[in-house]
Amino acid sequence: MVMKMKRGHESNSTNELIIFLEKASKKNKAPIWVALAEKLSSPRRRRIAVNLGKISRVTSPDSTIVVPGKILCSGALNHKVSIASFSAAKGAREKVSKAGGKLIGIRELVESNPKGSGVSIIQ
């Protein structure tokens, strides 16, 4: 029996998000969304994982960031920040809400800020 390797992304939702980001980038002339799509199109085993401690160190209060991977709960978040990510650990969700911040999906961020102004990608 010959096994075929699966090519492409692990789910249709990931492919749809990548296509959505590419279209949003062209429509709104916002290069940040195509850069984010490129980072999300990397293999799953190479996807980015960012701890809350790093987010706390590299952001300022009331900033907006996007993580093209998973947010992990190690470290403390000391200020209010809006974070869009592909996924987040349960502990990270709790710590973000305790700090007064909010955690949203990437698609929600693009719809609320089509130009991507003031948004930073954290790796």
Image (cartoon, rainbow, N blue to C red):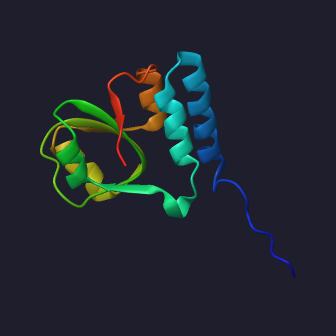
Residue situated in front as seen by the camera: 100 or 44:
44
Residue situated in front as seen by the camera: 52 or 98:
52
| Farthest-out residue, bottom | 1
| Residue 62 placement (x, y as % from top left) | 20, 30
Q: Which residue: 47% across, 23% down?
A: 111
Q: Is the residue 44 above or below the residue 15 in the image?
A: below
Q: Which residue: 24% across, 47% down?
A: 55
| Farthest-out residue, left | 78
| Residue 2 placement (x, y as % from top left) | 86, 78
On screen, residue 103 versus residue 6, left or right, reads: left
| Residue 54 placement (x, y as % from top left) | 23, 52
| Quadrant in which residue 120 is drawn | top left
On screen, residue 8 versus residue 69, left or right, reads: right
Q: Is the residue 30 above or below the residue 70 in the image?
A: above
| Residue 43 placement (x, y as % from top left) | 58, 58
Residue situated in front as seen by the camera: 63 or 106:
63
Quadrant where the N terminus is found in the figure: bottom right
| Quadrant in which residue 112 is drawn | top left
Q: Is the residue 48 above or below the residue 25 in the image?
A: below
Q: Which residue: 24% across, 31% down?
A: 63
Q: Total label count?
A: 0
